[in-house]
Image (spheres, helix red, strand yellow):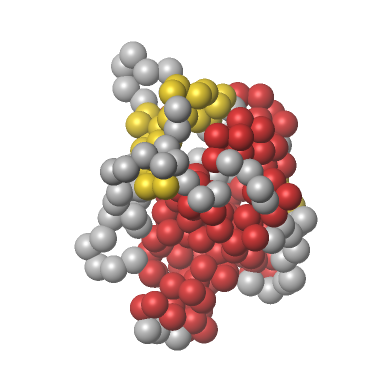
Amino acid sequence: MASQSEHQLGDFIKGRFLFIEEACKKLGRGAAEALLEIKEECLRLAETPERRAIIEKKLFGGSILSSSILPDWVDKVFLEAMSNVLRAPGASPTTTSSKSPCVAFEAGRFNAKRQAATVFRPFFSGKKPADWLRRDFPIIYRQCYGPDAAKSLKVEELALCRFRVTMDNRGLEKACPLDCSTTVGYLFGSLEALGAKDPVVNHTTCCLMARQGQDGLCVFELAWREENVPK
């Protein structure tokens, strides 16, 4: 079995459950029924008895706190199951741009706005998008993914209202195209929460789809419109 790396993912998992309720309202379907389908899909994707027991006891059978430490694969399985159950027939499960939303993207976007108003409010309140990217996003990233992952995080200011965020996700157990899609959504939702005008987030390079000549890192390009500048 793959290593079971763990991080402080409790609040993100709580946000996933809240997102499911919100998504079901928009879809006009019962949240309890959807959660049951998602649980069954999680158990199918978990693959081993040991992992299925964790899904039963920790994810669906216990009380998850914002400070809860969980194996990375739990969020990966939950995200995939949620996407499989909630997305429309024929819809893409992933995205590389905020211009083409998907379930995983919307889940990340929802969590960003929720956390900006709750658990991470001190990191968002009164901040401008550029300042948040330079100083506060690295703190959030370190808290959720640990110091080792944070060492590889690089935030570059390319121009006014244009940034590049680079991550090395190759050793992260939850790394997958769905997780990259939630990152696109989280960055986009954070820019929205911070009041950025017309934000756009593109995932221009993925560590899981690296080609010859690429270094295997995940790269996200962020841009928004400067204040007081007409379209």
Left or right: residue 40 versus residue 75 is: left
Q: Is residue 101 positioned above or below 128 on the image?
A: below
Residue 158 visible in this rendered orientation of the protein: yes
Q: Toward which corner of the image does residue 90 lie, by quadrant? A: bottom left
Horizontal and vertical percent for residue 35? 51, 76
Residue 77 in sight from this viewpoint: no
What residue is drawn where x is 40% and y is 84%? Answer: 29
Q: Nearer the viewer, residue 108 or 50?
A: 108
Residue pushed farthest left? 90
Q: Is residue 14 above or below residue 225?
A: below
Q: Could you say where residue 144 lies in the image, as x and y percent from the top left?
A: 67, 44
The quadrant of the rendering that contains the C terminus is: top left
- Residue at 50%, 24% (x, y): give it: 157
Identify the residue at image location x=45%, y=27%: 160
Q: Would residue 14 be found to the left or right of residue 215 on screen? A: right
Residue 43 x %, y % = 52, 66
Residue 225 left/right relative to 70: left
The structure residue drawn at horizontal position 35% and vertical position 31%, both measured from the top left corner, is 204
